[in-house]
Image: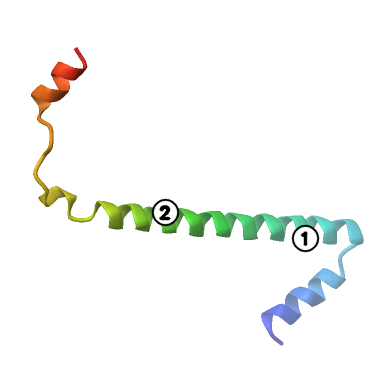
Amino acid sequence: MTLDEKIYQQVQGLPQSLQEELLDFVQFLRMKAEQREKQEWFDFSLSSALKDMDNEPALYSLTDIKVAFE
């Protein structure tokens, strides 16, 4: 028996109200997984965009920053 079949069999034995609660929980898990995937893509694209920036010359010095914010 596959996992899908086991889950289906277990859900069939639940009252309607618990089946609805289970559906809400499954939707919550899917939303959480989607958010995690979006965050992973964001982190990846940010790290890709900043890649090799350490090798670039600094445009401003600490003195420039102090002058601008004093």
Percent across and percent down for residue 66 are 15, 19
Percent across and percent down for residue 52 are 17, 55
Quadrant position of the N terminus in the picture: bottom right
Q: Quick check: 17 left or right of 65?
A: right
Q: How many marks?
A: 2
Residue 42, numbered circle: 2
| Residue with the most extreme bottom position | 1
Q: How is the image coloured?
A: rainbow
Q: Residue at x 22, y 55 (%)?
A: 51
Report the Cα–Cα distance between label 2 and label 1. 29 Å
| Mark 2 neighbour class, 10 Å CA radius: few under 14, some 14 to 19, many 20 or more | few
Percent across and percent down for residue 23 are 77, 60
| Mark 1 neighbour class, 10 Å CA radius: few under 14, some 14 to 19, many 20 or more | few
- Disc 2 marks a residue whose amino acid type is Phe
Percent across and percent down for residue 28 are 67, 54
Q: Are marks 2 and 1 in contact (CB under 8 Å)?
A: no
Residue 23, numbered circle: 1
Depth check: 46 or 35 in front?
46
Q: Residue at x 21, y 16 (%)?
A: 69
Residue 58, numbered circle: none
Name the image quarter holding residue 34.
Answer: bottom right
Q: Residue at x 12, y 24 (%)?
A: 64
Which callout, 2 or 1, points at the residue further toward the start of the chain? Answer: 1
Per the image, label 1 sits on a secondary structure element best described as helix
Per the image, label 2 sits on a secondary structure element best described as helix
Q: Residue at x 83, y 58 (%)?
A: 20
Depth check: 33 or 57 in front?
57
